[in-house]
Image (cartoon, grey):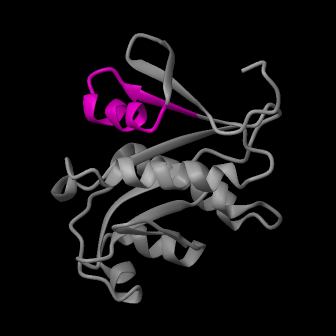
Amino acid sequence: MIETQRLLILPLTYEQLIQYLRCDNSLEKSLQLQESKRTLSLELREAFAQSILPNVAEPGRNYLYYTLWTAIDKAEQQMVGDLCFVGEPNGVGEIEVGYGTYDAFRNRGYMTEMVGAMIEWAKTQPKVRFILASTEKSNKASFRVLEKNGFVQQGEDDTLLHWRKVVKRVNSEE
């Protein structure tokens, strides 16, 4: 678990991920939290089925790079958003991050705080050198989170902006 000024950030176990998927507040009850109003996008449901659950269940994998990390507002005792990495570091030390804030908690700086905390966590991971992210061009709030955390835009395609953050320099080539 990671703690920030306002948040507890918890990596969910396989069993907790199953509860999360139900959207019936069973996860919140098991964590002794206030109920949440959250919905799962089709994109997140597909990620659960195709990547998150199979990889978290795989013995020998570092589940922290595959699971959903949930942000809990310490004062309100309520889940406010989530973040996940898209696998372990590749050969050059890159990991990709995705994140989202629940509708009722947007525009309060939670995700900026969470992403910042996860950058600090990534700095302690021996093989991580860079964090990548992609945002919809129209999602200004999402790319503001990245800008506030020192990500630099590295390119774009028709719909997405692509971002990169150096978290650990090995030499002066970056």
Question: Residue at horizontal 80%, vertical 67%?
Answer: 59
Q: Identify the residue at image location x=37%, y=71%.
A: 22
Locate the C terminus and report the quarter of the image it occupies.
Answer: top right
Q: Is residue 24 above or below residue 130?
A: below
Residue 89 is situated, as x and y percent measured from the top left of the image, at: 74, 42
> Magenta span covers which residues?
132-150
Q: Is residue 32 above or below residue 63?
A: below
Choose between 117 and 83: the one closer to the eye. Answer: 117
Q: Quadrant of residue 165?
A: top right
The one of 97 and 42 positioned closer to us in this rendering: 97
What is the tally of numbered marks visible in this picture?
0
Horizontally, is 140 left or right of 148 in the view?
A: left
Q: Position of 20 compared to 60: left or right?
A: left
List the single residue furthest toward the front: 172
Task: Please provide percent x and percent y for residue 78.
Answer: 28, 74
Q: Quadrant of the N terminus?
A: bottom right
Which residue: 24% across, 81% down?
A: 34
Q: Nearer the viewer, residue 2 or 103?
A: 2
